[in-house]
Amino acid sequence: MQRKRARLLWPLIGAAALALGFAPAAGATCNLNSPTGKITHVVYVEFDNVHFTRDNPNVPSDLEQMPNLLNFLENNGTLDAGDHAVLISHTANDILTTETGRYSDRDGIAIANNFGVFSPISAKSPIGVEFPSSFFYWTDAVADIDSLTADPLPALITETGQNVPAPWVPFTRAGCDVGAFSTANIVLERSPFDVVKVFGGGSAQAAEISSQQNTDFIGEAIHCAQGSPLCTTANGAEPDSLPDEPGGYSNFEALFGAKYVNTAFGAPLEDLDNNVLMGSTGPGFPGFSPTATQTLGAVATMLEKGVPVVFAYIADVHDNRSGSGTFGPGQAGYQAQLAQYNTAFGKFFARLASDGIDQSNTLFIFTPDEGDHFVGSTPSPANCDGVTTQCTYPGGIGELDINLNQLTANAGVATQYGIHFDDAPTVFIEHNPGPADPITRTLEQTMAGLTAVNPYTGNVDHLMAAMADPVEESMLHMVIPEDGARTPSFTFFGDPDYFFQSTGSAIPVIGPGFAWNHGDIQPEIARTFIGIVGPGVSQQGATTAFFSDHVDVRPTMMFLTGLTDSYAHDGRVLTEVIDKKLLPKGLSDDVKLTQALGQAYKSINAPFGALAMASLQVSSAALASNTPGDAEYLSLENQIENWTEQRNTLATQMKSMLEAAEFQGGKINPHQAQGLINAAAALVAEAEVVAAGL
């Protein structure tokens, strides 16, 4: 889950299943209401940085080298290869947006894998900026994660100040137990804090040493339906507390950690090769970088033991899973790990099929958090493909680590600021001056001109790719309205070869431990995929025929399972991947118009949509400008504010129309829809004309 980056921050069960003996919980019947009436299980797997597109045109991509997964998706459903991450594009917030269907300004985490918070100045926080981890349990407050912030608000916060509704709730209310393995924020993440919070400070669980807590209580969970025999006192069940959940959430329980999941199942979880999953102190959670065989073994067991809905996470393939460091495309170690992952998926689908769990009764969703930019020397030989000819990198591989604070100090700027270490660092200036304050403007102008000599190429690189202050960050859904302390002074989207930090040298140094940068705006980082298979999903194979992004996963899942959330999604149901015969009348009367409305909505509302990308160009020019009286900056900022206001008005109407037709039996008014489509196109065109003229 790319938790390694922390080192760089601050010093449903069907007849076939019943026949096989894993019956649903007595007193807890899973009642999904899918349009086909056939979905009885849900398998949701999120990868870390697994790619459908090629990083080297000669080397087959990750999915191409995992044909057991790729063929399953293409032969049985739709692989939407036009999906996109959110900004900034990192593991924690990308997972959250797929889990909830809400953009970051409606879930609280716009920056990951740590988020910045303006905080009281103290000896321990000398410039008044803290960077709590973005990995925490669902109900944690900001101050629970980092007490120096003194921020009592929920870390996952809605636009009205409540804790974000939890993604397992519609399932458990429908009588379905929900399993989770290594998935961000829906399992306990931190010892001892989360352990004390759930089990109590004087509990035997809290008395365990940290390594034992990590093995026993972190990383795995089952959120139980009422009446589930899994969540019993004997199995270690604890209250599943969600104080802010709309409509209340009383008398629900959960099993937190491998110790209790294993107890409920009667044996430890195993990988697909029958190896017991081991924590650092014995059988238990293996950590937040699980391989395919580990995660898929856990998922299969949960399904077989009567847990019908499972959310899970699989670590990337390009980092060395049997040692340290990382690999480049086509390297022997990379190829070997891809072969292992492919074997794991073959075993997984075969095992589930033998259990009677397959595309005829199960909704499968596979998606990565974000893409990556590979940083390394030219491969040798030049035509290597990793299959017949392995690639080597004689000039080395690794991101270019550079001290951003030292660079600006060398340029004569004494301003103190903290950054989220990244190739797209968010900047938090001491005392939080306003966007137009000379302190802020001088630092932005200085950063806009920064250069460095690339040790791989010897070229002088211009380090800025783009910049956004709170005006543009609002367009990008990066401003948390109920907690202004989390809004960065500005975000510096950098050259993706570089990793910006506050330590080390102002001269870039190759960091061989990490070579796959993300967080930034480049296409190889932005683009992802959504693979969907199951009853109601059309069989289209791979397609790039439409634009989607992470928030579309949740409403599509809810539609296909016949459930609803307690809030309006920022995403839309991907009608393009659904059997048209299953669409409600409000969507099917004019499918082309419905989809055109959906695409127009994405064009103005998605962080990687056409409007946002054009306005980001304008923002970059505005923040870099240095005209008398800052006239150009003020003019362009006003223009972006105006576009954002227009966008918000249009997007609200579009979202309301789509959501009503998708989940409430409403209809798409053709005249109103066409008017909104036309208005969105005009807004995008206006922004693109301004951007092209800069």
Image (cartoon, grey):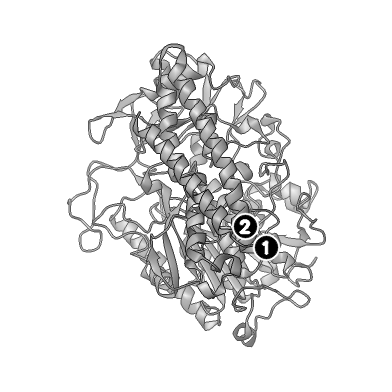
Residue 123 is tagged as none
Please determine whether, in this image, residue 245 is positioned above or below residue 378: below
Left or right of 345 in this view: 245: right
Neighbourhood count class around disc 2 (C-alpha, 10 Å): few under 14, some 14–19, many 20 upward = many
Please determine whether, in this image, residue 570 is positioned above or below residue 362: above
Asked if labels 2 and 1 touch by Cβ distance under 8 angstroms, the answer is: yes
Q: Quadrant of the C terminus?
A: top left
Q: Which residue is mark 2?
A: 659
Q: Residue at x 65, y 21 (%)?
A: 121
Please determine whether, in this image, residue 429 is positioned above or below residue 114: above
The percent coordinates of residue 620 (x first, y second) are 42, 29
Please determine whether, in this image, residue 73 is positioned above or below residue 515: below
Neighbourhood count class around disc 1 (C-alpha, 10 Å): few under 14, some 14–19, many 20 upward = few
Is residue 547 something one can see in this rendering? yes
Q: Residue at x 52, y 64 (%)?
A: 295
Is residue 270 something one can see in this rendering? no
Kind of residue at disc 2: Glu
Q: Tell which residue pokes out farthest to the front in this image.
A: 671
> For numbered disc 2, what is the local secondary structure?
helix
Q: Residue at x 77, y 49 (%)?
A: 244
Disc 1 from disc 2: Cα separation: 7 Å
> For numbered disc 1, what is the local secondary structure?
loop
Image quadrant where residue 582 sits: bottom right
The percent coordinates of residue 509 (x first, y second) are 33, 32
Q: Which residue is mark 1?
A: 664
Q: Earlier in the sequence, mark 1 or mark 2?
A: 2
Image quadrant where residue 230 sits: bottom right
Front-lying residue, 387 or 580: 580
Q: Residue at x 27, y 42 (%)?
A: 396
